[in-house]
Every structure is written in structure tokens, then in C-alpha cells.
Amino acid sequence: MPVTLEIVTPDATVYSEDVDHVVVPTTNGKIDILPHHVPIIDKLIAGDLKVERNGVVEYLAVSSGFVEVYSDKVSILTDEAINISDQDDSKIEEAVKRAQDALTEGKKSNLDLAAIQKLEAAARFALAQQVAKGKSR
């Protein structure tokens, strides 16, 4: 029996598939979710999401948000999510550099805490893309 994985961003539902299992990065560590998992709600952290379907493993990069497991459905609400196999290595490296540079400049300026946290989240998401791409090889 599969688990239904649904990933929703503010813009759209970016992933909705039946999968064998999914490994989710949370503030409490990585959680491997299989069919009949106990219900949970946890805070999602930026990182790589491992999805296995029909023996094939794919990696997605997710930003911060929340994960809810209920029955055989995994719902992920996040600011951003992308399938790493669709991304070019050079574009990921450029995104990491841009995010790190913006964060460095932001910390030097008079930005408020909320703006700094937003820049930090962008940097973590860019790094998550890089990590997930490395695992997908």
C-alpha cells in the first residue's frame, strides 16, 4: 500500500504522487515515513527530501515549512520545493553563491531581523539543492 505525498507551496501543488516511502528533514531529525505511519505534525527544515517510488529514488529540495502525516497521506507545506533532477549543477552553484553573497551584504547593512531571516532561509534552500543534487548521482 503506497503513501500519498503532496507538496504544496504558496504558488501551487508542486508534487502529488503515491510513493513507497519518503524521508523528510525536520527540526527533530530526518523522519522516514512508510505506509501506516503514526500521525505527526512537525516543523520542516530546508533540506533534501528523499522519495522512493517503484524502486526508483529521487531527491527534491525543500525550504522550511510543516509536514503532517495522517493515515497514509503526507502533506508538506513549504515556501519552495524543486525536483533536483530538473536542475543544472551550474545554476545550483550560482544560486548558492548569490544567496550567500546576499546574506553577507544583508548582515553588513541595517536590515531588520525578519529580512535577515528571509535571506538565511534562501541560503539554506540553495544549499539544500546542492546537497540533494549530490545525492541524486
Image: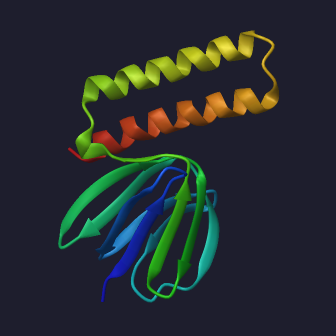
Residue nearest the viewer, comparing 9 with 55 = 9
Quadrant, the N terminus = bottom left
Instruction: Give percent across and percent down for residue 117.
Output: 70, 33
Compared across the picture, whether 66 is left or right of 3 comes to right
Compared across the picture, whether 30 is left or right of 2 comes to right
Residue at x-position 55% and y-position 14%: 101
Instruction: Give percent across and percent down for residue 72.
Output: 44, 85
Instruction: Give percent across and percent down for residue 9.
Output: 51, 53
Count the labels in the image: 0
Residue at x-position 40% and y-position 80%: 34
In the rendered view, would you say 115 is above or below 47? above
In the rendered view, would you say 78 is above or below 19? above
Q: How is the image coloured?
A: rainbow
Residue at x-position 35% and y-position 73%: 21
Residue at x-position 46% and y-position 80%: 73
Residue nearest the viewer, comparing 20 with 14 = 14
Name the quadrant containing residue 104. Answer: top right
Q: Residue furthest front?
A: 11
Quadrant, the C terminus = top left
Instruction: Give percent across and percent down for residue 43.
Output: 64, 60
Residue nearest the viewer, comparing 105 with 27 = 105
Compared across the picture, whether 113 is left or right of 37 comes to right
